[in-house]
Structures are given as C-alpha cells and as structure tokens.
Image: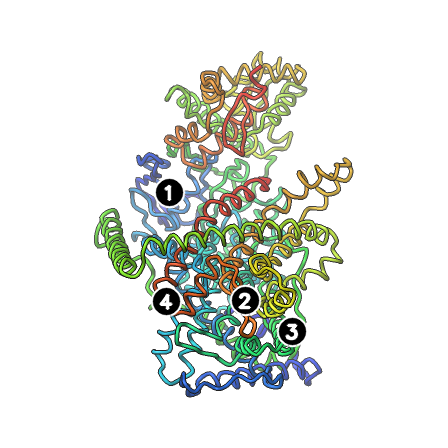
Amino acid sequence: MEQHAEVLTGGVWRQRGPGWRDLIATALVLGVVMLIGIGSRQMATPFAIEHQPEISLSPALLPLYTLRTVMRMLAAMLGSLLFTFTYATVAAKSRRAEMVLIPILDVLQSVPILGYLSFTVAFFVALFPGNTMGPELAAIFAIFTSQAWNMAFSFYQSLRTIPTDLDEASRSFRESVWQRFWRLEVPFAMPGLIWNMMMSMSGGWFFVVASEAIAVGDLQIALPGVGSYVAKAIAERDLAAVGWAILAMTVAIILYDQLMFRPMVAWADKFRFEQTAAQIVPKSWVLDLFRRSGLVAQACRPFGMAMRYGGRARLTILPSMALPRLVPRRLGDALWLATVASALIYVGWAIARYAGSALSWGDVRIAAGNGALTLARVALLVALASLIWVPIGVFVGLRPRLTARVQPVSQFLAAFPANLLFPVAVFLIVHFRLSPGIWLCPLMILGTQWYILFNVIAGASAFPSDFREAAASFRVRPWRWWREVMLPGIFPYFVTGAITASGGAWNASIVAETVSWGSTKLTAGGLGAYIAEMTEAGDYPRIALGIAVMSVLVIAMNRLLWRPLYAFAERRTRLD
Amino acid sequence: MFDATAEPIVALNHIDMNFTKPSGGKLPVLAGIDVTVRDGEILGLLGRSGSGKSTLLRIAGGLIKPSAGSVLYRGAPLAGPAEGIAVVFQTFALYPWLTVLENVELGLDALGLPADEARKRAMSAIDLIGLDGFQSAYPRELSGGMRQRGGFARAMVSDPILLLMDEPFSALDVLTAETLRTDFLDLWGGHQLSTKAVLMVTHNIEEAVLMCDRILVLGSNPGRIAAEIKVPLPQPRNRLDPAFHTVVDELYSILTSRMTEAMGAQSQLHGGLVQRLPEVAATRLGGFVEVLAAAPFDGRAELAKIGRAMPLPSDRLLPLAGALHLLEFAELEGGTIKLTAAGRVFAQSDIDGRKRLFREHLLRFVPLAAHIRQVLDDRETHIAPRERFEYELEDHLPRNEAEKTMRTAIDWARYAELFAYDDRTRTFNLDRAAV
C-alpha cells in the first residue's frame, strides 16, 4: 500500500552512518527472510502417503516444526487477504452479486472449520500427486477457512459504509477504480480489517494445529509441524513432549505478535476515521525501530516508491463497474433471480438424491439429538464463562495499570491453541478417573473464554470516567451499580466477546468431545464427537450430515440470539 | 461582478429531481430549475434546509444525474464529474489517512502527472491558501479552519474553471469562517485564480450577501427558484454599510414570506398532516420568545436586526421565527416578527403555564401532533407505533425531512406533555400525559 510512502520517502529520513537501530533492524529482516526461505523450500518436497517422513519427538526438531506451522499460517493469511479484496469488493459493488455472495458468506462462516478439512484433503492430495504441496494446501485451506470469512465481511461492511462526503470527493476528483481502491476503500476499511485479521489469527492457531495431523478414513497424513508433534506425543503418551510443544508455540505466538501484529496495529492507527486525536495510541517497538533506522528507510526507498506509483497509477483498463445496460433493470433482476433459483433447486435436488440413497431419517434423528446435546453444552459453557469472567474483566478494566498488564496476557491466551493443552487435561481425567461426559466439556471453551475476558476488559476500560464518577458521587448501591451502570456500559463489548466464544466453542467441540491418550479413548457424545467419529471412519454422507446440522444450529443461534442482542446493545448505548 | 452577457460556464436547464417514495411513487425535490453560472461571477444558492440546494450543486458537478433536464458545462453536455470542476465540501471530506500534502495531491490524481510536478503544484496550492508549514500534518491534527483550507487547496490545485462550494464555512466557528471568507475573496478579487466562476450553496443570508454577485433563493416542496437578487455592491463589502443592510433585509423578507407561504400551503394539504416542522427544540423557542418580548424589541422586531443584535446567523434565526409563526405565538410578515397576544402571555407565564399554552397551540396548529394524540386516545391500549405516522410522512417528504419533522413533533409533544414516546419500542403512548 502506498501509504507507507511518506514514512519511507517523505524527506524525513536523515543520511547518516549506520547506528544500533540499523543493526537490529537488518538482523530482523535477514532473519525473517531466511526463515521464510527454509520453510518454503521444505513445503515442496516429494511426498508419498505410504512413505511419510516420521515425526520425531526430539525437542531439537521442534523449532523447525514450529517454523513450518508458522509458514502455513502466513500462507493462509495471504490467501485470506486476496480473497477479501476480491470477494468483498465484488459483493459491495455489484448489487446482483451481493444477493448471492453475502448469504453464501453467512453460511460459510457458520460451517465448522474442521468439517471442511475432511472434504478438501482428498481433493488437494489428488491435485498434486507425489508432492507435499497437496496436503500442505489442504491444511492451509483449512486455516484459510478459519480466517477469510470474517475478514471479507468486515471489508464488505466498510465498503458499504464509506461516508458520503469521502465518496463524493473521490468521484469529483475523478479517481479511477484502481486509485479509489487503494486511496479510499482499503484505507477506510483498514482498522476493521486489521482487527479482524487479529481475531482470525487467534482462531487460526487452533486450526493450524488441528489440521496438520489429518486422518480421514484410510487417508492418514502427518505434516511436519507442532500439531503433528503433539499428535505423536499423544499416541506415545509423552507428557514431556507436550510440554515442549506448548513452549514452542508460546514463543512462536509471542514473536508473531511482536514482529508482525504490533507493528501493523500501530501503523494502521493512522487510518482511524475519527477526526479527533486518540487517547491511547498503539505503539510498537519494531515499527519505531524501522521508522527511525536510516538504513532501512534507504533500503525500502525503491519499494516505497513502487507502492506509491502503484497506488497513484490510474490503470483505467480495469472496468468501471457501470456496464452498459442491455435489458431494463427489473427484467435483469428477474432473469438473475431465476438463474440463482434454478441453480439452488438443482443443488438441492442433487443433495437430496445423494443423501436419500446414503442416509435415513434415523441418521438425521441421531445427528439432531447429538446437536441438541452440544447446543446445551455451548450455551451452558458460555453462561458459565460469562459468570466467571465478566466480574473479573470489570475489576481489571477499571484499573488502568492492571489492564496494561492483564490485557496482553488475555489476548495471548485467546490466541494460544487450546488443543495443545488437551493432552494435559486428558491425562488428568484418565489419572483421576473423572467422568468424560462432564469433564471434557470445559475443553470446548478453554481457548475461547478469553475473548469474553478481553472484550469485557476493553469495555470496562473504555467506560467514560465521568459516568463512573457520577455513580460514585450519588453513592449508587452495588446491586444497582452492576445492573444499571456497569453492565449496560460493557454490554456491547460483552456481546462481541460472547459471540466469538460461542462460535469457537462449536468449532472446538469436534476436537474436544472425543479425545485420546495413547490407546485410551474418551468420548463425551454430542455433535462434535459424532463428526469426529464419522471422519475417522471416512463416512462422508454422515460427516456432511453432521456438518449440516451444526451449521443450521450455529446459524439459528446467531439469528435468534446473538444478532438481536447485538442490535439491542448498539441501540441502547448510543447517545445521539 | 455579474454580467448577463458573459460566457455561461455551466448551465442547468429545466432540471427536475425526484426521489422514490417508500410506496414506489415519485417525490419531487427539484422542479423545473434553470440556473446559469456565468464567467466572472460568484453565484449563491440560498434556501432553508431541505430545499434541495445541495442536490442542485451536485447536479452541477456531475455527481448526481438529474431525473430530467440537461446540464451544459462550457457548452457541452456534462456526463459525470469533469476536468475543470472542483468541489469544496461542507465536511471538508479530507482523507484522514493522508497528510495535507497527499490530500492536495489527490486533486491531481486524475491528471496522471509525473510525481515531481504533482508535488510542485500541490506545494504551490498549499502556499496560496496559507497552509504552508502544515503540509505534513494529518487532518486530525488541524483545527477546523485549517482543515477547510486543505479542502480549498485540494480543490484549487487542479486549477478548476468552475468551483462548487457546498456550505464551505458552515462547519466553522464565526471568527474562523470570517477569516477564511475574506482570504478567499482576496484571492478571487486579486485574480490570482484560474477559476472563472463559483457556485456556492449557503443558508446564511449575511454570508451570501458578503460573497455573491447574484443570489438565487430556492423555495421548497418541491425546490424551485423563488427569487433572484443581484448584489451590486463593490468588494470588499462592509457589513455595517446601509446598502448591505438593505439587501440583507430584502432577503430576510423574501425568505420569511416563502416560509409562511409554504406553511400556509402545507396546512391546506392532507389536513396539514404532512407539514414540515422546523428543527427547533421547544426550550429554545421559550428563550427566543423572552428575548422578543423584552426591551428593546418589546414584541416586535425585524429579523435582520435581531440577527445582528443576538448575534444569530440567519440559518439559526429563521427556523425559530418559523416555528413561532407556525404555533401562532408570533406573526411573520415581510421580514418582521411580531408576538401575538398568546405569545406575550407565553413570555410572562411560569413553566407550567407555558406548558399548558404550548399544549393548546400544539393541538390546534400542528395537525400531526393532534393526529397522534387522537389515535392514542382512540386506542384501547393507548399505544401506537412510530412507523405508522412516519410512513405517512415519507410519502410526502424526503426521508431525512420526515425523520426531522418527527423528531421535532416528539420534542414539542414531550415538552407539552401531550404524549410520550418510547425509543426502545419506537412507540407513542399516553404514559402519565393522559391525565
């Protein structure tokens, strides 16, 4: 993006001898480049399902495994960005495309991610026979599915809400489609997009770990990475190795955050649309280092110039979306809707025929029953987590110094793939002979409960201090204080956190409701366990059934509970 | 200075603009408008809010396509934004993520100039408008006045032939606006600009008289040209000049008579239910009545005089006067406002007396409020949804106007305790107002 330019070329950098900043910055850049090189070379090595490289439990190999895992994450993020920029742009600019693309996105976002994996892995392996690229792509695609949808949604929403005056300015200065995209649309969407990338990233670690050791029916693949390492550790009941993996992942996530996301968030601060100065300016030592290092500035100069020209270029070959109208608008709409409807009917018919031959109503009943069980669990767990974390979050959020310490930890915990911790929990359950039906449930929300915590902290710390002082000066009683001051104040934040937590819990149920430790297998029942079992058996019709039931439940929960709650929260806390 | 024989820069011929009603029909906002902006003049479009003047400006700039009629820019039909036309926005519309310099360069994007030349031209535009030193600042670091200077520099950088200004000073405080106006007039008068003509939208009478060579007054519902006034005063103009006052007074009188006519006409239509209500809070009306009743006005004054004495710009003053006229607490005639007997009583009453009186007048003179109350009385539950009434309004008023009218009706009814409104359920009810 050309917005880098003024940092890099704006005449602010000074010509001087290399300083300590240059040394560190150069070391950082070279290090990252080298690591990417090593990681990507290994991705394209020959591969045969029968002769897979054995995963070793030696901690010495862990850094390499972690690197591979991180690389997959990076690749998926690039893919997600590309998807976001194209899919969301088309949806926002074409009314007819929007009618189809947005509902599809809505459904896609409710499908359990691990569900995609069982279907796509066979496809990708067939696509690149004899090369690791196939399974790699399958894993990357799974991570992609955990990241892309909410990013695309955020971008689409931003494009639809570009303020009229900026839109008119852009049109009156006759910017081309390309210029407008880089000058207006992307920058305006940036804060929302970065926030969603962060959320996606946090979720992504979970799936990157889950998608490395793939077992669908007879197809058994273990891609070198932290996830496979843990899978192996579980198979060999090696608790120490699990510990090593947790350590490696912790280091990886912290580095990722410091080297990539912090700088991005700090940089993206300038895209905030509010015209007032912010109270809290995000900071990043890496970004500061790069901005102040003369050597880096000089090295980046051509790069910055290229981006600058790229953004300014008119590229008028790109079609401006206004195509000549061949048929009247209403007739066009009717034709389009008819096409979409017939496609839908055909797909529905094809599914019904396929499902009808493989499934019976009894299967549907079983899946629905399991679904109800998981639904009850998710609801209960979100409620329980809220009871615990809301008071704690408020307590922390009202104390700025505590917030500064706790918030990064809670964000880290939300990003940490909880499935790495599962073996520890399972070990304990086996050791103390606890009931899996009850004790496996907390695993579903182990990773996502932190979203509630850090959103509540954010809400409480954003709560206007004059409201608090007013409440204090009127000596509002504790009960009323909670009910009428604090809870309404943090409500929108809480709802955001709870939506994420519940979505994550659904996804996690597939790996949390049935777990193993060596040869010991624990199952808690429920829809997640159902899908996991069918996946292991390679029973595609029933995998599809399980996924469909879960999607329907998630969509229903979003429509009937979360959306109304969110709308209510937004309306109620608005002052104007 | 206006010259009727000068070359037309932009000519709008028989412009109609319709919005679509929720029920599918057409709602005219501009009807049969002819405007020609000629070489060398600053033409002002003056009108109350909702008269469609900003829409007209956007049509002249090619940002909106009119429903009917043609736009000729230097003799050729205008299809979309064109080279040589630049817009200054009321909200500045600077991109917050670009520095002042980059924002100004944006005005050159379409020309595809080499980077060096673009920078040079941007810097000289920044110099010209008095922003030098601020070029590396982000808009959020600037005060409102400096931001609008950025807006001006961005519009000027491409050396436009026609400059369109949409209430460019209305978001600024009085002093800042004055400085910026003067600076702009200096540039314009000093022929330092390549700009040949300016079309400016404003709802501030004094500003229009200060700047324009010719002023078109837009009447509303649907917008059409109600009057054309030439301002033959030489620049720089002096606000204290009696000739200046004469023009201001004349405009006040035109605008008030337009307003009272429109109110009269609206109260005949559809039982007055679709009457547009001025956006004035009830408590402000109380304050205004007090000022009017007290010395030196003693219940009767020219609006232009009040405007100078308070001081209150015309766009704040006219809705107040209109509201009093509507509620028959005062009578407007030819730019003069006179308190009625009820208005005098109102001024002397205590808060409860005022509320009682206000309520009486609300029921008698604002059919919308009376209608809502009637429906609430008739219903057993004493509850009625807001949508029901808003829908009726939207059939006759553009959506945002309907929304504003409804807001005013609610505010007045709350003050008069005529009925209550619950925003959570978006329903009207009688609450304790019933007693």
The residue under label 2 is A201
Q: Which image quadrant for residue B127?
A: bottom right
Q: Position of residue A486 (x, y in %)?
A: 68, 43
Q: Residue at x 56, y 31 (%)?
A: B245
Q: Nearer the viewer, residue B247 or B181?
A: B181
Q: Position of residue B235 (x, y in %)?
A: 54, 44
Amino acid residing under circle 2: Met
Q: CA distance from mark 3 to mark 1?
A: 64 Å
Q: CA distance from mark 2 to mark 1?
A: 66 Å
Q: Please give left or right for residue B128 compared with residue B376 in the image.
A: right
Tags 2 and 1 touching, CB below 8 Å: no
- Disc 2 or disc 4, which is closer to the eye? 4
Amino acid residing under circle 4: Asp
Dot 2 alpha-carbon crowd within 10 angstroms: few under 14, some 14 to 19, many 20 or more: many
The chain identifier of the residue carrying mark 3 reads: A
The residue under label 3 is A286
Q: Same chain for the residues at labels 2 and 4, yes or no?
A: yes
Amino acid residing under circle 1: Ala
| Numbered tag placed on residue B4 in the rendering | 1
The chain identifier of the residue carrying mark 1 reads: B
- Disc 3 or disc 1, which is closer to the eye? 3
- Disc 2 or disc 1, which is closer to the eye? 2
Q: Where A13 sits versus B26, above or below?
A: below
Q: Nearer the viewer, residue B267 or B177?
A: B267
Q: Nearer the viewer, residue A251 or B335?
A: A251
Q: Earlier in the sequence, mark 3 or mark 2?
A: 2
| Numbered tag placed on residue A539 in the rendering | 4
* Local SS, label 4: loop
Q: Earlier in the sequence, mark 2 or mark 4?
A: 2
